[in-house]
Image (cartoon, rainbow, N blue to C red):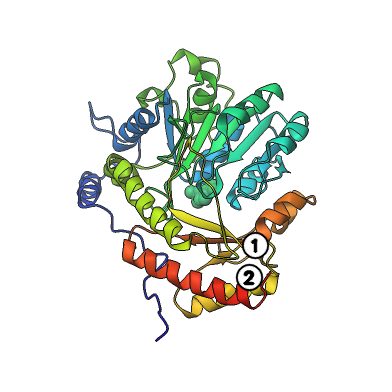
Amino acid sequence: MVERFTGSFTQQEPIPEAAIEAALAVMRHGRLHRYNTAPGEAGEVALLEEEFAAFTGAHYCLALASGGVAITTGLRAVGVRPGDPVLTNAFTLAPVPGAIAAVGARPVFVEVTGDLVIDLEDLAEKGAQAKVLLLSHMRGHMVDMDRLMEVAEAAGLTVIEDCAHTMGGSWGGVPSGRHGAMACYSTQTYKHMNSGEGGLLTSDDDEAMARAILLSGSYMLYERHRARPPAEAFRRLRAEVPNISGRMDNLRAAILRPQLAALPAQVARWNRLYGEMEAGLASTPGLRLIPRAEAEGYVGSSFQFQLDGWRGEACADLVARCAARGVELKWFGAEEAVGFTSRYVHWGYAAPPQLPKTDAALSGLVDLRLPLTFSREDVATIARIIRAEVGALYQQGAA
Ligand SMILES: *Cc1c(COP(=O)(O)O)cnc(C)c1O
């Protein structure tokens, strides 16, 4: 009999009981707005910010309505103005160039390598074209961050990190998000902590974070924040920075605080699933695994592999054949954007240039989710199915 997988690729774990209790408490007292606090009460949002800052080692943290809002707030906070070019790696998720467009700026795409990280040579070449690099650690793949920071410094670039897929990860022991001037995280359902929607922004920079807090819609109540710059940092800015509402509420923060405490254990669980998939797919003819650097403390919440040199038709066949056996794969080489899977050519507003290296990197790129509702046996089953189907198509001359 043909083996089939019957689990769901999009089913998250339930919200932990402690988080449900905390959410109920917020609903019972009714003070959902972050600035609606009882005397002496910090509020869940301010506490989450303080705890997330401590978790990453950042001086300051601001909680926002979404990861996308964290990015737009970060871009504005470092001084990006309408019309400005902003560099970003061409392999990322649609809300990243979307955030650049949202502030009226212009995405300038930098090539990515076949290992799915920004191409540092192309970055060095394009560095002079912009003042800001929005670096997206897409699917959790981290470039050599020490070299990246050297290239960025030489080009005079301010780096904002999009850590939607590296929350809980690190490079050379330094938590992801601690290399650039600011870092953005998402707590949307499909990321590493789940509040439905939500975002976090971290920084050590007094002025940028004071701007960000004012931008987030702090009404002049910024002194109630705990992970914030000193009050002097706000004094000059408070009259000139617009209040663009994008705050997080106490209900979401209440759900997130227990999840943050559990994050390191969750990361370990993801990496066990990742290791199982890597072992299951190792040395499959026609399939190339993405190497992970020694220094890369990744979070294996999703898995990617390359079908180097495969014809588009054969890639589409693989997706269809695996789907028929219950395995949901996403292919980044498709003509049309499907669901969450789009690539730079689909972002017409950005007037995308031709990026031959990125085209080569994405034409055979296959991606799958590893939700924590999978067991290691589930992952082993999925790997066997992929291995069998890749093997069959490769033998028939897929490449
Ligand atoms: C999800 C995601 C975002 C945006 O987060 P939202 O909370 O959905 O706005 C940004 N970058 C990447 C790489 C993402 O996956």
Q: Could you tell me residue 45's position as x and y percent?
A: 34, 36
Instruction: Please tell me how crowded label 1 is: few (under 14), some (14-19), or many (20+) other residues with Cα within 10 Å.
Output: many
The dot on residue 364 is: 1
Q: Is residue 233 left or right of residue 364?
A: left
Looking at the image, which is closer to me, 20 or 53?
A: 53
Element type at marker 2? helix
Identify the disc placed on residue 315.
Answer: 2
Asked if the residue under mark 2 is in contact with the one under mark 1, i.e. CB atoms within 8 Å, the reply is: yes
Q: Image quadrant of residue 118?
A: top right
Judged left or right of residue 128, residue 286 is left
Mark 1 falls on what kind of element?
A: loop
Image quarter of the N terminus: bottom left
| Displayed quadrant of residue 158 | top right
Tag 2: residue type? Cys
Task: Pick the residue in front: 183 or 326.
Answer: 326
- Which mark is first along the chain, 2 or 1? 2
- Quarter of the picture containing the C terminus is bottom right
Determine whether, in the image, residue 6 is placed left or right of residue 90.
left
Instruction: Provide residue 141's location: percent of width, then percent of height.
Output: 54, 45
Query: On screen, 393 above or below 286?
Result: below
Is residue 134 visible in the rendered image? The answer is yes
Q: Could you tell me which residue is drawn at 74 percent across and 52 percent down?
A: 349
Neighbour tally class for label 2: few under 14, some 14-19, many 20 plus, Cα within 10 Å: many
